[in-house]
Structures are given as C-alpha cells and as structure tokens.
Amino acid sequence: MKILMVLTSHDQLGNTGRKTGFWLEEFAAPYFVFRDAGVELTLASPKGGQPPIDPKSDLKENQTSAMERFKQDQEAQRALSRTARLADMRADDFDTIFYVGGHGPMWDLVDNPDSIALIESFYNSGKPVAAVCHSPAVFHRVTYQGVPLVKGKRVTGFTNGEEAAVHLTDVVPFLVEDELKRIGGRYEKAPDWESFAVVDGRLVTGQNPASSTAAAHALLELVMQPASHSF
C-alpha cells in the first residue's frame, strides 16, 4: 500500500509576525500508524524539502508519545526533511492521500491548484481522501461531479470554539467549521479538543490534533476494504 502525506510549506501566521506551519502531532501520529502497518509513505509539500513545524505544537504541554518517538527516529526525521514537491505528485502512484493539519495549510494549500487537482484525481479514480484539523479546509474548492466534494457528506474539522480558544478567529482566512457548512457539508463535532473522526464514503476527516490517530486508522481501514467504493 502507498500513501501520500501532504504538509504545508507556509510558516507565517497571517500578518501577526508569528510563526506557524504544520502541527507536529498531526504528522507524527499518522506517520507511525501508517509506517507500523507496513505502508510505503511519500511526503510532499508545495515547496518540497523541510516543511515548517508550528513552534507551538512542540511546546512542553503539547508533547505526545508519537512526537517523542519522532524525535528518536532518524528515518522519520530524514523523510520529513526531504518532502517531494506537491506539483510532481500523481494520484496514479498512490492508494490514498492524507493531509496533515496545522494553521499553515490555511494559506498555501486551501486554494492551491496542484492540491485541488490532486484531490479531485484521487477521488475521481475511486480512492479515499483524508484530512485532519485545519486541513479539511483543503476541500473547500474541490468538486466532484460538478458540486463541492463535501456537499451532503458527514464531515468534521477544527471547530469555531477551538479556533476561538487559540485566539486566531480573526487571523485565519476563514473558519474551517463555517466553511465546511457553507459548501454543504453535514458538519459534526465532538466537545472541543476531544478525539473525533468521521468517515463518509471515501472521505475521512478528523476534528483536531487529538483526532490524528483515529483519522489515520480510519483511513487505513477504508483503503484495506475489498472492492471499490461507489460514491
């Protein structure tokens, strides 16, 4: 099995002057879920090379076992430092695609033509697509059979309450929860910061950093199911 993991290349938190990037737990947890299952992993980002880690995600209070494992794993660190360029990726080469969250994707992935075309290519060829936390926002311009991909589908992502709790409601280009609802998604959520992942057909979404492991397991299960999915 081959999985493409996509990360942000963006390191500026709007015009706040602060740094952002991808959320380390949202990479580390799925990475090891996939690798431990024997998956062949390819990492990609818009610019290629080392993607920026959101410094807040590596604070003492945010440490997890997956992050600790990542810091002891030279193979994982090397893979992260050498991400491929997103524009060079083709859906034909993989079984599924997983978008790592963090605030960075809100600026360089949500309207990225390469990303939009890639997701559509995966989905049009009957393959599952997955995103966690802020990354479900990458679906906001993705269409399937002429309508938004998420329209009528159960979906989750970073909540308005969670965004307010980190004081970035007025910094992000849009709110993930509001946008998923606007384009017709049947948005669902658990209490803020709790693990919550949703599967609807071939679409897998996770709510927040705590949902990374659940979303990764849900995607694995979906990909390993026999027979193609009809929707």
Image: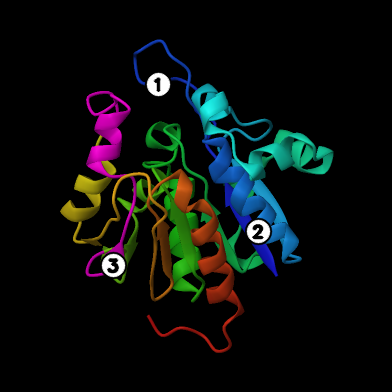
230 or 53, which lies in front? 53
Q: Quadrant of the N terminus?
A: bottom right
Residue found 67% across the figure and 30% down from its top: 50
Residue 36: in magenta span: no
Distance (Cα) linking label 2 and label 1: 29 Å
196 or 86, which lies in front? 196
Name of the residue lying farthest toward the right: 74
User: Residue at label 2?
Assistant: 33
User: Residue at label 1?
Assistant: 13
Name of the residue lying farthest toward the top: 17
Q: Is residue 63 above or below residue 190?
A: above
Residue 116 in sight in this render: yes
Q: Mark 2: which amino acid?
A: Val
Which of disc 3 and disc 2 is earlier in sequence? 2
Distance (Cα) linking label 2 and label 3: 24 Å
Q: Secondary structure at mark 1?
A: loop
Residue 166: in magenta span: yes
Q: Residues within 10 Å of mark 2 (few under 14, many from 20)?
A: some
Q: Secondary structure at mark 2?
A: helix
Q: Mark 3: which amino acid?
A: Arg
User: Residue at label 3?
Assistant: 154
Q: Position of residue 111 (x, y in %)?
A: 36, 41
